[in-house]
Amino acid sequence: MINKNIDPFEISSSLQEGLIFLGNQRMLLVDVARMGFLRQELVATLGMDRAKNVLLRMGYSSGIRDHEWLKKIVPESDVQELLRLGPELHNIRGGAHHILHDLKIDANQGIFYFEGVWENSYEVDIHKELFGVHSDPVCWEAVGYATGFCTALMGKPIYFREVSCRGKGDSSCRIVGKPVDEWGDIEDELSFFKTESVIEEILDLQSNLSKLRESVKGPYLSADIVGNSEELLNSVDLLEQVCNTNVTVLLLGETGVGKECFANYLHQKGSHCSGPFVAVNCGAIPDELIEAELFGVEKGAFTGANTTRIGRFERAIGGTLFLDEVGELSLSAQTKLLRVLQDGMFERVGGSKTLKTDARIVAATNVDLAKAVDSGEFRKDLFYRLNLYPIEIPPLRKRPGDIQLLVEHFVHVFAVKHAKKIAGIKSDVMDLLTSYPWPGNVRELQNIIERGVILATYNGYIEAKHLSFSPILPDKPNAVPTSKGELEIQGGFSTLLDQMLQKKTSLEDLQNSLILSAVNRAGGNLSDAAKLLGMSRSQVSYSLKKTKTSSE
């Protein structure tokens, strides 16, 4: 039986037994540094908003418990007396010193208005020490405590708002409390009091994963090849007819159309699916290293070759070797590749032993190989060998009906990748996406949707402000850089010269702008950008690095 005459705020202890009591409530003596560590860990683990959520609900629960405890200890107290004891209890525990400015309360009529100031809030001190001045109030636990205590006191939802806070640079921590229905639109603030289960997020991710798996069915051809346009289905049909053969396939199409996705699809559906899928971008490897990369290197073959290293053909034994940008191969590498295609035989660089591979070869290029043959840049016999079964993959602008399916697919993919729940994409944004010509094709769309998922709010929609489109170079003769580094077409050569002089644009700035625009137009592919500019890939790469260094 509870002693009704006990001082509710009498502190007693038995240090030998590790016991501290406030009234008849067992307490812990916790230093501020420990609470600071808790806040820091919550923010680091859950993020600022969810840390606020946890501390608000912790304070809210404590406020409700203290109200129930005081009612049992001092049952004769009326509502106003309990309201005086609540802040006093919070004060004794070291949370903050309360100063009342205004109070109107009538429990029978449901009237409640509280205005006051918190002095020496421990939450302000630790938050500023850990994170500096914040953009919003930081006395989260205290707001939760006052809200919980007064909600229990009045028997109806009461909400306290910290209208100013030293934690965000104000002169004082001022609070106002009143019934929820008198605040107006505070749904966003009340959402912090709701329990957010990590399990729910895991279930959401599982749901998204299920949607990805389901996307293989219906209008989605696979997890990577997405669409139901006639142009795309014709290309896929050609691909499926050779899945169970060993014929070499040549995939043609612009940069970013999804040639590697087609190669992967062919591998997964074909007879080599149990083996590895090995991809190599021939255009990204220097000429002097491409043979070593493809065929391997024997120890001692050249200076620095300290160990034997197997090449891509050996790694792909029993599986599929995807040679992307095959039009970039040197004539020497083309000669060795031709032999492998003819009889499956090759040697490592510096080696004498003949090796054999049964890997299926899938090649891809956006180069016109017939023209490359005419110019002497590509072997005619290799072209005929590769061109046995060509498949043209249509650019995205020729299948606009697939854009919405691709957008929905990528939203699911990147929501899972970034552990973020996305409500969807707004209709006006979808209209914008379907009307854009997509010079970078599917790869450009994929990058833009990933950016949208990252920038969108949790459980929110992807909006136009979350997207960023690469600049398009119209088919006009001249262009000048804008202040953003993009190119603006302005007319003939004399006009270009006048604008450069007027804007004091240097030749170096013009070159950098041309290179940046070409790289954007090529969807980030440096080899394609180099072709557009009539430069080598290494020149483009060097210029980009130089531009980045100077901007830093």
Image (cartoon, grey):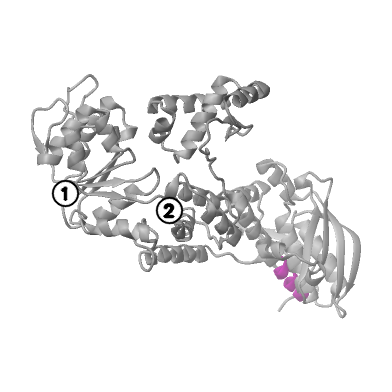
Q: Amino acid at mark 1?
A: Gly
Report if residue 460 is visible in the image: no
Of label 1 and label 2, which has the lower sequence position? 1
516 left or right, relative to 313: right
Classify residue 532 as left or right of residue 66: left
| Range of magenta residues | 63-72
Could you say whether the residue bearing mark 1 is in a helix, strand or loop? loop
Q: Quadrant where the N terminus lies?
A: bottom right
Instruction: Count up the numbered dots.
Output: 2
Query: In the picture shown, does residue 354 fall above or below 137?
Result: above
Instruction: Say what secondary structure mark 2 lies in.
Output: helix
Q: Residues within 10 Å of mark 1 (few under 14, many from 20)?
A: some
Q: Check disc 2: other Cα within 10 Å, few if <14, some if 14-19, many if 20+.
A: few
- Residue 278 is situated, as x and y percent measured from the top left of the image, at 26, 44
Q: CA distance from mark 1 to mark 2?
A: 36 Å
Principal secondary structure, stretch drawn in magenta: helix
Quarter in which the C terminus is drawn: top right
Residue sitting at x 18%, y 36% = 382
Q: Position of residue 131 (x, y in %)?
A: 66, 43
Let me know if residue 99 is in the magenta part: no
Give the quarter of the image for residue 499.
top right
The answer to whether residue 64 is magenta is yes
* Residue under label 2: 398
Residue linked to disc 1: 318
- Front-most of residues 20 and 394: 394
Q: Name the residue type under label 2.
A: Lys
Does residue 97 show up? Answer: yes
Please name which of the two marks, 1 or 2, marks the residue nearer to the observer: 2
